[in-house]
Amino acid sequence: MNRYTAGAASLGLANYVKRHAGGGTPSIVIAHDSRTHSAPFAREAAQIFAAAGVKAYLFEALRPTPELSFAVRHLRATAGIVITASHNPRQYNGYKVSWSDGAQVIPPHDGGIIAEVRAITGAGQIKFAGFEEARRGGLIEIIGREVDEAYLQALDAQRLCRGLDASIPAGLRIVYSPLHGTGATLVPEALRRWGFTQVSLVEAQATPDGTFPTAPKPNPEERAAMELALAQAAREGADLVMATDPDADRIGIAVPNAQGEWILLNGNQTASLMAHFICTRLREEGRLPADGVIVKTIVTTELIAALCRHHGVACVDVLTGFKWIGAKIREWEEARAAGQPSQTFLFGGEESYGYLAGTHARDKDAVVCACVIAEMAAWAKSQGKTLLDLLDELFAACGVHIESLVSLEREGLAGLDQINAMMAKLRQAPPTAIAGVPAVALMDVDAGTRTDLVLRTTESVDLPKSNVLHFSLEGGGKVVARPSGTEPKIKFYFGATEGMLQKSQRRLPLAEKTRLVRELLTELEQDFVRLVE
């Protein structure tokens, strides 16, 4: 991204919101992360908006993406942008747009904005208002601590152990790293307000720095990015390690096992634990709503669906991408406002380490999730348990579920042809079994159909069209295939479950069942890749 592409995006967005803002002056909230050029891109966006007659609310300094999502609704703005490339390496940057509900744009707004951007044909069309002049005229307003405070107060509503002994959070020892990003602005303060007094910051990664000197890939999914935090946790005898990516919408966590080895929990495990904890605590306090719902993406673990059945709450699947979770929240809010049947959103999660508890934001929120995860770990510790123990208990109650992701890279136009050929092959001759496990259904999201492969019946599915194939396997397993939208690769998501084991195997001890499910998962991976190549 350069000055021209960023400027064209800003002018195109300004032109679009002026046509769709309704009455009054349209407004856009602007945030940015710690990347080298993010701050000047954000400042220039404010000047372009002002020149176009759109009011800009510009954060005084870097802020997390979820706070931008909150601020759009808090300030009743028409839209919001955040200049960030999230968890990607330092050479990248990006321009993320949210609509008036604080969620990332979906149709028709995404296509409409892109059309306006493409209508910009030269740099001469992009005009910049004088920054100070626009401030004096009210078209640029600097925001900061007052929005921070409102956001932190909104997070407080998500506390689940408020009535328990105050010594419970105070007894948890946490090591936290913002990975040189925006998390340092709010995560430590949020944890302090929730009662966590033993929070140790990884100082080498605490200063915002777009070159990411200690984490070239600032992605909390990867162990390499967590190594400094893990080493510090081992020295300090911590109970929990947490790290947020540069724009603080994703979070990775680690806990020690009984042997003192630090175990990183993946996105499926963390999402499942959070969903289970939220439902458990709400039920214990008599606050679990009868119309409660948890939302996950179709590639995320089916353990969440199983635990929803266990707790008696609904589980809704959406396409990959958190924008679709945000869209569901808006759909239910609008239905409730119109007096129509609705549901109460409890939690949303995706396997790629993005989660949301509450509706204060409409995007992944690592700030509130850091607090909920810490509260969950403290609650477990007060019972002599760890998050690994809670995961074992969840497996015992809802069955062992283990997932994996396999990506095949195919470069260039020839690679694109190969990827398209793989998807075409799966559509034209879908496998009847994978690693000997019968395939019982195939959902073709692009065609909008779900075919029962046993009964040979087909029904429609209520999902936006997308090039995704979802195979349901006997016993609750699944395989999902989809081309990446941003990289030259095709992705295969695998899920194996205890229900796929033989009856005699399901009676084995948990550790043995877990080993067998892992072996089955490996067999699924190997056989499916062999089938498509």
Image (cartoon, rainbow, N blue to C red):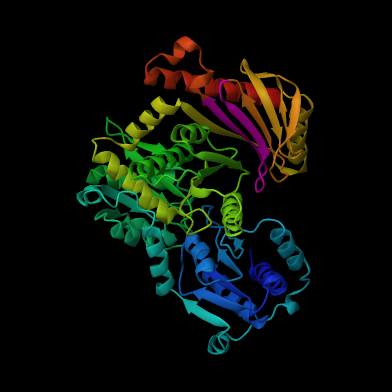
Q: Residue at x 42, y 46 (%)?
A: 252
Figure quadrant of residue 396: top left
Near-viewer residue (103 or 175): 103
- Which of these two is toward me, 339 or 396? 339
- Tell me the quadrant of the picture where the N terminus can be found: bottom right
Q: Position of residue 52 (x, y in %)?
A: 68, 80
**490 is within the stretch colored magenta:** yes
Viewer-closest of 419 and 109: 109
Please, what is the dominant secondary structure of the magenta stretch?
Answer: strand
Residue 499 position (above or below residue 486)? above
Question: What span is colored magenta in the figure?
Answer: 475-496
Direction from residue 232 to residue 51 in the image, left or right: right
Q: Residue at x 46, y 68 (%)?
A: 62
Q: What residue is shown at x 63% (from left), y 44% (from top)?
A: 319
In the rendered image of this protein, does residue 71 appear above or below residue 488? below
Q: Is residue 211 left or right of residue 124?
A: left
Q: Is residue 270 above or below residue 215?
A: above
Q: Residue placed at 54% from the left, 19% from the top?
A: 500
In-front residue for pair 307/436: 307
Task: Name the quarter where the C terminus is drawn.
Answer: top right
Indicate yes or no whether the magenta region holds residue 348.
no
Judge whether residue 214 can be spotted in this image.
no
In the current view of this chain or complex, which residue is farthest to the front?
339
Could you say where residue 26 lies in the image, as x and y percent from the top left? 63, 76
Residue 192 % position (x, y): 29, 59
